[in-house]
Structure formats: C-alpha cells, structure tokens
Amino acid sequence: MRNIFTGNQNSFTLHIRITKKCNANCSYCSSFERNPNDLMSLEDFEKSINFIASKIKELNLGGTREAITVQYIGGELLGVPINYLRKSIDIVKEKLSPLFKHFIHGAQSNLIGSTTKIDNLFLLFDNNIGTSFDSFTEQRKVKSSSKLYKTIFLKNVSYIKKKYGKNISGIIVVDKEMAPFLEQEIDIANKFKRHIVLRPVFNGGSEVDKLSVSELENIYEKLFDNWILKQNIIIDPFYSYLQKRIYNLQNKPIDHLSGCPSQHNCANVSMNLEPDGSIYVCLDTADSKTLVLGNALRNEFNYELFAKIRDRSNNLNENCVKCSYFKECQGGCMKEAIEHTNNMYGKTFYCSIWKKIFHKIDKNISEHGIEKIQNWLDKISKY
C-alpha cells in the first residue's frame, strides 16, 4: 500500500523496500511473497543506491524538484537489525542527499514490536513514521491471532502518543470487510486527530476481494459529505483534491501539490527499489510485478520501457485531457490504468468516483465560498 508519509509532495520520491519479510499476516497484503528474499548485504545495498544515484543524474529524475523523499517500507522494518537500518540510512544520505537541496525520509511500520524497537525507528527517521489502521476486522494477525495483533498495536499507538506527543497517521485499506466499519474507523481517527489515507485494496502479493466501482462511489460520496467542513482531520485523497481544486480556481500553480496517485509523470518523479535489486517506477507496480525497469545489482536498465512510461504525459486518454478536472487528477494512477485497460496510457477505473467527488467539491465551494473552506483546510492541517 502507498505510504501515509509523503513528505514534500514537490519532491522526487524513492521507495526502498528493505525487506518483504513480516512478523504479521494480513490477508490483503499487497507485498506478500511466500519465500521473500533475505536482506541485501550492505555492500550490495550500497551498489544499488549508487546505481539509482547514477540514473537520477543521467535521466534528470526529479527535474526541477528540489527535494528527495525517501520512504523505507517492508515487509516490516521492526524485524530488521537496527545496525543494518542505521548503516543503510547513512549510505542513502551520503549518496543521494548531494543530488537535491533538501533530504526527507520516513518509514512505514505495522508497530508490532517492542517499544525499544519502536524508539529506534522513531530516532532513525526523525519521528516520520506512518502505519495503517484496522480496528474492527480480523484480517490482520500475529501468531494467528487478530486479537493479539490489535492488543500490541493499540498499546504501541498509546506509547507513541505518550512519549512523542504524536498522533500517528496511517492508511485505511478499503475492501469488502472494512466497508461496514469505515465510518467508525474515521470516528476513531477524529477522536485521536489522526490523519488518514483511504486506499482501495488491490491485487499484489495476495488475492483480494475488491469492492465494485459503484460500491466505492457510494462509500466515498458519503464519507466526503461527512468530512467536509465537519471533521478535524485530513482524509486523503479528499484533502488533496479539494486543495488542488481551490488553487486551480484561484489560478495558483498546483504542481507542488501533485503526487501519487494523481500524476501522469511518474517516471520522472518516483522510483522503487526491491530487496532483490529490482527497479520499478513505484511500489504499486512493484507489488504487482508490472513494468520492471531493471536490476540495480546487475546494472540493468530498460531504457526503452522507461521512455514509454515517461511518455505517458503525452499519450493520455483524450477524454482525460479534455476533462474539467484534469489539472487536479492528472489522468490518475498508471497502475490502475494498466489493471483496468491493460494500457499504461489508459484511464483508471476510479475515474467516475473522482468526478463525483469533484462535483461535490465544486458544489461546496459554490455554497460556502473558497475562503471558508480554505480556513478549515488550514486549521485541520495544523494538527
């Protein structure tokens, strides 16, 4: 799943999947593998980062973006030896920070581990840690127990709040089992002022039971109506789309607000490194093993495929380009387009959902005015 931690959206994003091994078992895990690779040696890790640095310079990745955001993901990072993580971070900073004006990093964790390991993670990543939430279903288990998972998770969430004063943010995976509990999950997020990302489940390492587009439309429309001007947390993608729409209507630039999953220039602004050295554009294409760009350990790079992906900006569906909301949506997610149309230049199957959300955004702007909505957005973004 996409990481909750996005750093500066006006940045080049590098996902580093340190491991695919995990201490838990979640039925909808997109990165699940039956026999995941062991950790790279640190020598191989440095070789991989050197390879990525060379491609950033050679292909001018990031373009005019001044920052790099490095997101460390799993599997589960709490199972990785702390010395390995520390040395890996040092390698990444040494090799990549000179290429950009600003260096930002963060990590994703299921928080199933000791408080000592959690402290180490917070220290290493400057408190930039994200997670994911599921308070009601039994799809997440540790030692075959969903109750044990919830007990450890909630204890550590409380520990983080008490020690770091942080309401940790996270993803909510939207699937058929979660759907009946979404409003309750969001109520909890509001109570504890946790920002969240709604992420429809997708096929990656595990087969999943997805909601239909019409079911998702009904869910998202209701959640949006319950959120706008009423709640005190950021819910994405609602927040991002609303902010971009306001900026666009005010003729303000919105490129700095654009990021996954609403961008058509993925090849220029993101990359993903896997534990076996494989290179992808993003973690979603990595999870589904779609469009592998090469392998950093073997010094392999598919320039022809990269050029095709990079050219997506010039080959989007004509209806997308003509859409009133194109600047905000930018044609949607390439991975979703491939899954829907078998064409990287195609349309996401969530197009109708986003159009309905934008219609609601315009209706609220007309009814309440930009100033009132912007003041509310500024208020909730301060938490």
Image (tube, rainbow, N blue to C red):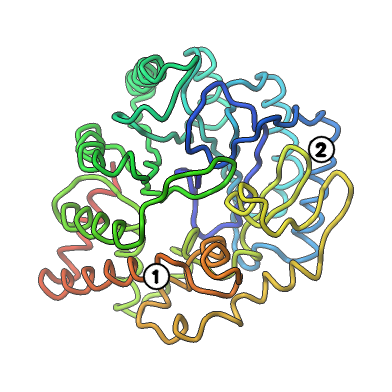
Task: List the residue tagged with mark 2.
Answer: 46
Looking at the rendered structure, the secondary structure element under dot 1 is helix
Horizontal and vertical percent position of residue 178: 32, 40
- Disc 2 residue type (three-letter): Glu
Residue 378 shows up from this direction: yes
Q: Nearer the viewer, mark 2 or mark 1?
A: 1
Q: Residue at x 51, y 26 (%)?
A: 25
Q: Residue at x 48, y 38 (%)?
A: 28
Looking at the rendered structure, the secondary structure element under dot 2 is helix
Q: Outermost residue, right direction? A: 298
- Disc 1 residue type (three-letter): Cys
Disc sitting over residue 351 in the figure: 1
Q: Residue at x 82, y 28 (%)?
A: 41
Horizontal and vertical percent position of residue 27: 48, 33
Left or right: where does residue 221 sit relative to residue 115? left
Query: Which sits in the foreground, 217 or 128?
Result: 217
Report the quarter where the C terminus lies. top left
Assess disc 2: are there few (<14), some (14-19) or many (≥20) residues with their C-alpha within 10 Å of its C-alpha: some
Q: Looking at the picture, does residue 157 appear above or below residue 176?
A: above
Q: Disc 2 and disc 1: Cα gap in Å?
A: 40 Å
Q: Which quadrant of the structure image shows residue 213?
A: bottom left
Query: Which sits in the foreground, 67 or 17?
Result: 17
Left or right: where does residue 242 sit relative to residue 67? left
Q: Looking at the picture, does residue 183 appear above or below residue 152?
A: below
